[in-house]
Amino acid sequence: MPIHDSLVTALDDIAKRLLQELRTARDLLNGLGEVGVCELRASAEALPGVAAADSSRKLKSYSMALVYAIQAAAVRTPLGSSPLLVEGDAGYLVPSPQAGEAFADEAVERAVEFMSKSLEVQLLLRSSEAVEVALLDGSLFHFLWYSKFPEIPKNLRSFKEWPPRRREIWRSIVDGIVRMRRIGIVPLFVSKRVRRSYYAERLLSPVARERGLGVDNDLILLALLRASGRLPKGPFALEPVYIESVEDMPRPLNRLDPEDRSVIEPLVPATVTYVVFNPASQPYQVTVPGRLSPGELAELLSSLYPHSRSGYPDPLRLAHHACKIRTREFANILLKLGIGQLPTGRESLGEFA
């Protein structure tokens, strides 16, 4: 069936609104303040030992069960005797009529996300020999996020034996990051999406805000600065912003109970910046536990520049491809193992597993 005219009309309206917002954002240019930058240069010293980890996950809903799979990979460079570690997990949930299990799909999806993050951190610790920098995909606060992590359904079954309570899985992630720092590894978080803006308030002048031109999105403002030639054409990082205490963290991390608060306190202060390794790529948000001066930050990111000339750190790119679970491959293996023969309830609509 072709796309209906009403959907085309709705998309046309949305496109016009979005373009209008971008045009409004351009009016901000004269009201944007200056931001300091640290230019990056390839270091003449030996490249640091770098490890990177990423994970992939898939969920498949059947009419009588929900099946999930996780695959995590860690890549270490310069290449050693064991440059790649891959670990997987799988499990299922049979929905229960008990109270609190009505939203099993969402609960499993969030629990699986935290399981995959825990696997990433564990693999990095296992790859820690001769490693100075550990790269993770996502912001520090994405790894620490807690409020939307639901209780794990009691009837969730996994190949690995995960702790029965969410707090233990969450703490396995935080404790792993803290341990990296204690053994001398710098955990560096690279985020492709903006979950929280840090520079918008700094860059927007009071006059611009009075005119109602507030755009609280760092990437939009940085794109405007780049288009106007106010940012370097080569690789650079913005002068850092600091998260000085737990109170400065986003909610709910700044409202944790004392026991959980004590767990994350070793990760503050934290340093936040945006880095551009290649002028053709977008800025990526970088978070590092600890307070790094502009010079220290520039030195750290410059050491990664030879790994990142394409715009994105190559070790993270390799880890991403090594762990990727493709939808068709997942469906095929479920079919070969016999799970794909379970009914989905959508067969009458011409849709099959």
Image: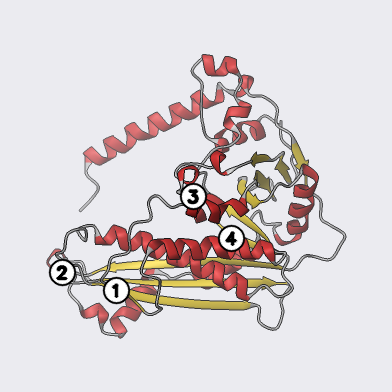
The percent coordinates of residue 253 (x first, y second) are 48, 46
- Residue 347 image label: 2
The percent coordinates of residue 55 (x first, y second) are 49, 67
Mark whose residue sits in front, 4 or 3: 3
Label 2: which secondary element = helix
Task: Look at label 3 and name its amino acid.
Answer: Pro
Q: Residue furthest front?
A: 258
Dot 3 or dot 2: first in sequence order is 3
In the image, is 231 to the left or to the right of 135?
Answer: right
The percent coordinates of residue 145 (x first, y second) are 46, 52
Mark whose residue sits in front, 3 or 2: 3
Mark whose residue sits in front, 2 or 4: 4
Which residue in the protein does label 3 denote?
258
Dot 4 or dot 3: first in sequence order is 4
Task: Look at label 1 and name its amino acid.
Answer: Tyr
- Residue 136 image label: 4
Circle 3 Cα neighbour tier, 10 Å, few/some/many (<14 / 14–19 / ≥20): few
| Res 138 seen here | no
Question: Are circles 3 and 1 on residues that touch, CB within 8 Å?
Answer: no
Q: Residue at x 61, y 71 (%)?
A: 125
Label 4: which secondary element = strand
- Residue 92 image label: 1
Query: On the image, which quarter does residue 303 sit in?
Result: bottom right
Task: Look at label 2 and name its amino acid.
Answer: Glu
* Viewer-side residue, 323 vs 249: 249
Query: On the image, which quarter does residue 108 sit in?
Result: bottom left
